[in-house]
Image: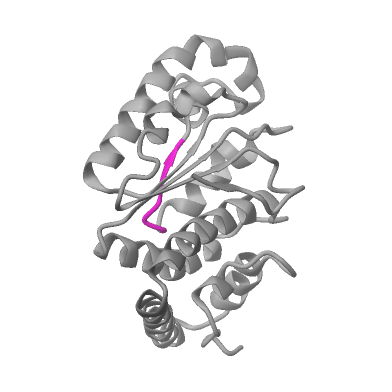
């Protein structure tokens, strides 16, 4: 495979295929020595392209940052299976992108209130995907689940016990968001089926220099649309 793709966005694109899933599978087949070479190549390619775009059109950098995070979130919803290779791949590609935005003093805030037929993705897949990406995963349902897990509650009973943990989990998620904003950490904030009030603090950063604010209300399986606020 040729890892020197034309644009940084090509490493995440979901329009014709789930690039993250397919490229991660290819990446996982490489030896450790091969991965080291590819890692350096990918980092140089992504960073160089972003620098070039910034020189030509700084406003486009906002669109690109939001688009890449949206593609990562969509991939988590669309992938048929998950493996550690996905985390390793994102640890090179997504982390390089996020580190570049951090170096420019830009924070990416991504919000969504999508619903799910089951909780496997929001409780297990998303946090594993984002762990190495330099993207903080903020989700009150996930925070509640971690407390339930410690208490021995099986995932099948998540809905049954969620109300017992909801208030504390919501407060913890809001505190985490404030800390992300204070320290300039990029994050994906998922609050399942929540109203706009759950995102009020993040929404206050709209039109603030150094902050990219995006919101996805439509299901990622059905639409490529998200709002850049």
Which residue is found at the position 48% from the left and 21% from the top? 197
Q: Position of residue 38 (x, y in %)?
A: 45, 85
Which residue is found at the position 42% from the left and 27% from the top? 200
Q: Position of residue 177 (x, y in %)?
A: 34, 34
The residue most toward the top is 164
Q: Is 57 or 109 nearer to us in this picture?
A: 57
Which residue is found at the position 58% from the left and 90% from the top? 2
Horizontal arrangement in the rendering, residue 1 relative to residue 91 (left or right): right
Horizontal arrangement in the rendering, residue 22 relative to residue 144 (left or right): right
Horizontal arrangement in the rendering, residue 140 relative to residue 114 (left or right): left
Q: Is 19 or 198 nearer to us in this picture?
A: 198
Q: Position of residue 86 (x, y in %)?
A: 55, 63
Q: Is residue 154 magenta?
A: no
Q: Is residue 217 above or below residue 20?
A: above
Q: Is residue 200 above or below residue 66?
A: above
Residue range (magenta): 133-138
């Amino acid at each position: 495979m040729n890892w020197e793709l034309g644009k940084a966005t090509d490493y995440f694109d979901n329009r014709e295929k789930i690039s993250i899933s397919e490229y991660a599978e290819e990446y996982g087949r490489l030896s450790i020595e091969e991965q080291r070479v590819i890692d350096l190549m990918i980092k140089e390619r992504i960073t160089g392209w972003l620098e070039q775009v910034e020189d030509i059109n700084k406003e486009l950098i906002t669109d690109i940052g939001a688009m890449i995070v949206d593609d990562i979130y969509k991939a988590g919803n669309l992938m048929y299976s998950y493996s550690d290779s996905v985390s390793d791949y994102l640890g090179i590609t997504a982390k390089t992108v996020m580190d570049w935005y951090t170096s420019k003093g830009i924070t990416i805030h991504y919000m969504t209130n999508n619903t799910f037929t089951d909780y496997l993705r929001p409780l297990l897949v998303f946090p594993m995907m984002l762990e190495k990406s330099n993207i903080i995963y903020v989700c009150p349902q996930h925070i509640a689940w971690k407390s339930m897990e410690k208490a021995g509650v099986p995932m099948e009973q998540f809905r049954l016990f969620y109300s017992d943990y909801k208030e504390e989990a919501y407060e913890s998620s809001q505190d985490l968001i404030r800390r992300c904003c204070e320290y300039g950490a990029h994050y994906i904030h998922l609050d399942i089926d929540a109203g706009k009030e759950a995102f009020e603090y993040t929404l206050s950063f709209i039109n603030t220099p150094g902050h990219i604010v995006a919101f996805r209300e439509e299901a990622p399986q059905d639409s490529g649309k998200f709002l850049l606020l």
